[in-house]
Image: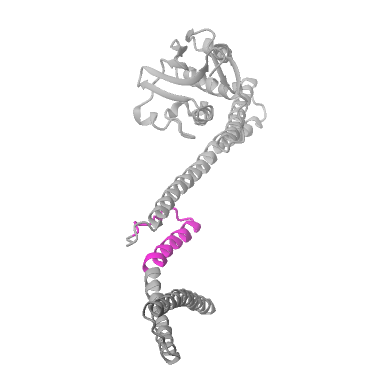
């Protein structure tokens, strides 16, 4: 009750202040006009006004000012109620819902006589903000759910095989098998946490790129050779066509994340005796890298989401990754100002294409 009384008192004080403002403004303007009029009449006609005439005119003018000020205050109050107070109430109400966590709220178009009031612009930006917050909240919820799921899987494996390892009289072969499963699950868990930390730093701009000019072909070959043991185990054919002296100015450490993830995926999704290809070409101002494989391919509906966090189109390989690799790749390319795209045919393989601005003759 006291809050309502306070709001009512504030409204009354505001109305009185507006009335006094109109009164003083009109009194000043009308007084100046009357003085100018009387002086002009006196000079033009030589007519002299008596004190009684002036007092009578002053009283009439005063009451006119009082009535006109009251009329202007009422009109201004009605105008404010429909053209200011109502839009502000809509915005405040929507903001309160946002504060309560309801990001589905939207402000409808303002039906206002004053088309240039600016409230429609505020409403548009508010709706865009609400939409962005809604998307962020959805991503946050999905992220937490996915992280929880991804953490549970390796932890369950470690727990189960750890229990089995405690069995007395366990054969050596079984003990080694269970120990390897625990080690693999631990490694997957460590990789998941590492990728989450990297992605968090990249998305919050806590990693600042250290730009340097270097030979991109040499870096690609070094990264590819790191997977030699894996491709030999699967008897994969490796085909390379790397142009020489293609220089780029970028953060070598961040770009190594891109190449390692692309090579890892290409080898992982390619069946034994398949082929993985790497090409590097200089096309105008850009260095174009293509990593191709003869794996299972990516369906169109999956290709739309592969750069999203935790998305895994091929669940048969889910135990070999955590769905963060391509999200890291996409974020790195955004920071580097590059571009990444994918083309694929189901059953025939995929090709990832990366474009980076290259250095030519010492200039970018």
How many marks the image carries: the answer is 0
Which SS type dominates the magenta stretch? helix
Residue 73 vertical position relative to residue 361 in the rendered view, above or below: below
Residue 279: in sight, yes or no?
no
How is the rendered protein coloured? Answer: one colour
Horizontal and vertical percent position of residue 274: 43, 11
Along the viewing direction, whichever of 279 and 41 lies nearer the viewer: 41
Residue 181 vertical position relative to residue 287 in the rendered view, above or below: below
Horizontal and vertical percent position of residue 335: 53, 30
Along the viewing direction, whichever of 285 and 171 lies nearer the viewer: 285
Residue located 66% across and 32% down the image: 166
Would you identify the image quadrant in which residue 363 lies? top right
Horizontal and vertical percent position of residue 251: 59, 23
Q: Residue furthest front?
A: 46
Residue 311: in sight, yes or no?
yes
Would you identify the image quadrant in which residue 122 lies? bottom left
Along the viewing direction, whichever of 207 and 179 lies nearer the viewer: 207
Would you identify the image quadrant in which residue 119 lies? bottom left
- Magenta-highlighted residues: 82-110
Question: Is 248 within the magenta?
Answer: no
Q: Residue furthest bottom?
A: 52
Horizontal and vertical percent position of residue 266: 47, 18
Residue 332 vertical position relative to residue 268 in the rendered view, above or below: below
Residue located 40% across and 73% down the image: 77
Residue located 41% across and 23% down the image: 342
Give the side of residue 100 with respect to residue 47, left or right.
right
Question: Is 97 within the magenta?
Answer: yes
């Amino acid at each position: 009750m006291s809050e309502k009384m306070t709001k009512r008192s504030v409204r009354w004080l505001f109305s009185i202040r507006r009335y006094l403002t109109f009164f003083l403004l009109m009194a000043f303007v009308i007084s100046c006009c009357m003085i100018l009029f009387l002086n002009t009449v006196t000079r033009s006609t030589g007519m002299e006004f008596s004190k009684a005439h002036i007092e009578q005119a002053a009283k009439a003018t005063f009451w006119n000012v009082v009535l006109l000020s009251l009329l202007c205050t009422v009109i201004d109050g009605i105008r404010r109620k429909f053209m200011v107070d109502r839009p502000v109430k809509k915005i405040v109400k929507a903001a309160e819902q946002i504060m309560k966590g309801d990001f589905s709220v939207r402000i409808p178009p303002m039906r206002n006589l004053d088309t240039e009031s600016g409230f429609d612009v505020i409403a548009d930006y508010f709706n865009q903000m609400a939409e962005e917050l809604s998307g962020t909240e959805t991503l946050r919820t999905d992220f937490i759910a996915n992280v929880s799921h991804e953490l549970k899987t390796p932890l369950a494996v470690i727990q189960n095989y750890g229990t089995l390892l405690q069995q007395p009289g366990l054969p050596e072969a079984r003990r080694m098998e269970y120990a390897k499963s625990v080690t693999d699950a631990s490694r997957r868990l460590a990789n998941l946490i590492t990728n989450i930390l990297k992605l968090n730093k990249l998305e919050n701009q806590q990693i600042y790129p250290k730009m340097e000019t270097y030979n991109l072909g040499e870096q690609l070959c070094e990264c590819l050779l790191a997977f030699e043991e894996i491709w030999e185990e699967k008897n994969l054919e490796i085909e390379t066509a790397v142009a020489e002296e293609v220089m780029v100015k970028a953060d070598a450490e961040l770009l190594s994340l891109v190449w390692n993830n692309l090579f890892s995926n290409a080898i992982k999704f390619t069946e034994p005796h398949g082929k993985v290809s790497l090409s590097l070409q200089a096309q105008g101002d850009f260095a174009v890298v293509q990593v191709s494989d003869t794996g299972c391919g990516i369906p169109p509906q999956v290709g739309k989401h592969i750069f999203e966090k935790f998305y895994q189109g091929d669940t048969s390989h889910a135990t070999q990754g955590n769905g963060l690799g391509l999200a890291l790749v996409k974020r790195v390319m955004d920071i580097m100002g590059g571009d990444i795209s994918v083309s694929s045919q189901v059953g025939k393989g995929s090709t990832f294409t990366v474009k980076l601005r290259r250095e030519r003759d010492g200039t970018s």
